[in-house]
Amino acid sequence: MRNDSDFVPYVVELARSLGAVRSRAMFGGHGIYLDTAMFGLVADGQLYLKVDEEAKSVFAAAGSHPFVYRDGKRRPIEMSYWLAPPHCLDDWEGLEPWARLALAAVKRSRARKKSGAKGR
């Protein structure tokens, strides 16, 4: 397992081709942002990327799985972030299509919220 304190700056640097990518510590992990869009989550040394119903099938086909945490009653809570395929962390060319899928999912989610449609 990677150490988040080393891995987070690596992910931010890897994604810099997208623009002003930054990280922010939150809930024991780190959010990965482009401007105000949180498109990634680093937790336990792993990168998870934002998905919606449209992107989920692409991640599932790559063998990915969702980030799941346990609430105060130890119930599993599935988040809308799925594990980035390991090969995509080697270089920008590997990460780019996955990061763009995640950013598109953020954009669609915001559009649904803005229109008042339910995204769940």
Image (cartoon, rainbow, N blue to C red):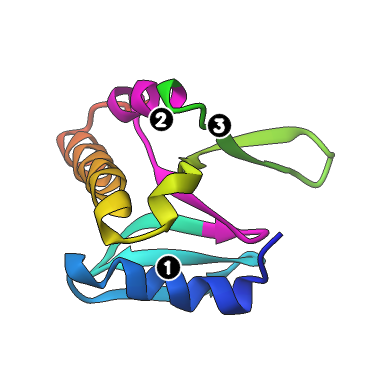
Q: How many marks?
A: 3
Instruction: Of the two numbered discs 3 and 2 on the same chain, state the one appearing first in sequence.
Output: 2
Residue bearing mark 2: 59
In 3D space, how far apart are the residues under numbered discs 1 and 3 (Cα atoms)?
A: 19 Å
Q: Secondary structure at mark 1?
A: helix
x and y percent of residue 71 in the render?
75, 44
x and y percent of residue 94 in the render?
31, 50
For this view, does 66 lie left or right of residue 51?
right
Would you identify the image quadrant in which residue 113 lies?
Answer: top left
For this view, does 1 lie left or right of residue 51?
right
x and y percent of residue 69 in the render?
69, 44
Q: Is residue 66 above or below residue 102?
A: above
Query: Residue 43 shows which numbered tag?
Result: none
Please tell me whether residue 54 belongs to the stretch shown in magenta: yes
In 3D space, how far apart are the residues under numbered discs 3 and 2 (Cα atoms)?
A: 7 Å
Which is more toward the observer, 111 or 48? 48
Crowding at mark 1 (Cα within 10 Å: few <14, some 14-19, many 20+): many
Residue bearing mark 3: 65
- Image quarter where the C terminus lies is top left
Q: Which residues are magenta?
A: 42-60
Instruction: Of the two numbered discs 1 and 2 on the same chain, state the one appearing first in sequence.
Output: 1
Would you identify the image quadrant in which residue 66 lies?
Answer: top right
Crowding at mark 3 (Cα within 10 Å: few <14, some 14-19, many 20+): some
Q: Residue at x 19, y 65 (%)?
A: 18
Residue bearing mark 1: 11
For residue 24, say whether it is visible: no
- Image quarter where the N terminus lies is bottom right
Q: Residue at x 25, y 54 (%)?
A: 93
